[in-house]
Amino acid sequence: MENDSGENPTKVNKYACACAIVASMISIIFGYDTGVMSGAMIYVKKEFQINDAKTEILAGILNLCALVGSLCAGRTSDKIGRRNTIMVASVIFMIGSILMGYGPSYIALLVGRCIAGVGVGFALMIAPIYSAEVSSPSSRGFLTSLPEIGISIGILLGYLSNYIFSRLYLELGWRIMLGIAAIPSLFLAIGILKMPESPRWLIMQGRVGEAKKILYKVSNSPQEAEIRLRDIKEAVGIDENCNDDIVKVPESAQTHGVWKELLLKPTPSLRWILIAGVGIHFFEHATGIEAVILYSHKIFAKAGVHDTRKQILATVGVGLTKFTFIVLSTFLIDRVGRRKLLLTSLSGMVVTLAGLGFFLTIAENSGGTLIWALVLSIVTTYAVVMFFNIGLGPVTWVYSTEIFPLRYRALGAGIGVAVNRLMNATVSMSFLSISEAITTGGAFFMFAGVSLVALIFFYFMCPETKGKSLEEMESVFTKGKSSENFNK
């Protein structure tokens, strides 16, 4: 069965899927760094004899530098293209990984993580944008969530790397854990050259002929390709009857002055889009998932797991849970919709974060001697990860990438990722201190409260976008026209 665009709503174009998979490889590398640092910190702390404050800085510095990278990436991708920006991200991350693997001192390790962080900022901004711009409306949720699957695969590989290389002697093990990420970064930087450029970016440059050829490759039918081409030309301001391969793009479609238009003088619908796009990134990490992913070994230690290798092994379960449910969500996101997954996810997180706080409080007060409290602490940890990855995790990147109009997409996504990295850094650099001040259980009660606020925000601010073309998004956020999208 086809819709009026000639597009099979259940079909995913193989070429578009291949492009999205390759773009998602950079996310695997970033996910690996996140996962491997969880275990590597244990051994870095032992070798350099650093305290909790320096450990928090080591954990969070990558995300602070990623904030800078994400803000630079928007402008960069508008200038040199989406594909070339992914290549730049790979090279920057490779340099940072080499320096981390060398790591002769704590300062050198910080510098390496900061350089890698700039690459991460570029990657997190550009991979979802590229995937969204090559995909059809019916498969955009699936393809745009592939980078989040990549992160989950990378985190799981990082946890497994911790377990495997923890058998090596102290000075070598953690350096291999961190430095080995340079190898796939190099291969990705070379392989990315085989990918096509985003057709939407090409049309923004007036290169309509090239864009048309790519649209025919990434669309499910010639009719769909023509409709997508017409819609993009209309959005850019090019006459839809113009068949020239190279055209002059109207001044209004250029990206000059977008900062002022988006941040200082936005239209009502654009302001709503900006609030929703930035808000979803804020709450993705304000709800505390980074504390679970990065400090899971600390959580399990508080619950009563005191053997280092058993802590690392338990973190592998976190990675497996994350991967399993992120894969499940990719098949649901275009069927169930973004909004329903978000509301289900946050409802579950409120309950499971409160449960984790409760069981950890009991476990801490008993000194880790109550087996049932230990078991339930581990179970609720996995449950938090499950509910996060069934909705909030993948939907954040799909939703924030697709809602911005083409002229503002790179900048809007860059601002969203900057807020995302800022909150990630805030949580990762403060969790140990917060836990010390109000206990680990108390920290998760706090995150449960934030999740409740997030649930209210999403209920009132995030309409459904399933099945809408990228060019239709502004009308979704227009008052009067959006009411039907809140009832889906």
Image (cartoon, rainbow, N blue to C red):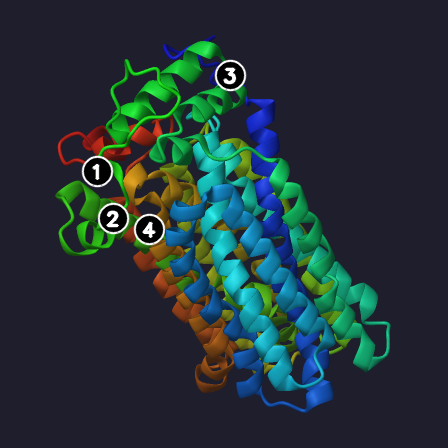
Q: Is residue 70 above or below residue 274?
A: below
**Label of residue 480 in the image:** none
How far apart in space, not on screen, are marks 4 and 1 (Cα)?
A: 18 Å
Q: 264 or 83, which lies in front?
A: 83
Q: Nearer the viewer, residue 429 or 308?
A: 429
> Where is mark 4, residue-wise?
411
Q: Position of residue 99 (x, y in %)?
A: 67, 73
Residue at 56% x, 74% y: name it. Answer: 59
Badge 3 is on which residue?
220
Closer-to-camera residue (476/370): 476
Label 3, secondary structure: give it: loop
Residue 276, position as x, y percentages in the image: 28, 49
Q: CA distance from mark 2 to mark 4?
A: 11 Å
- Amino acid type at image mark 1: Glu
Helix, strand or loop status at disc 1: helix
Where is 52 relative to 154, above or below?
below
Q: Which residue is mark 1?
A: 251
Q: Are marks 1 and 2 in contact (CB under 8 Å)?
A: yes
Depth order, front residue of 328/262: 262
Q: Which residue is mark 2?
A: 256
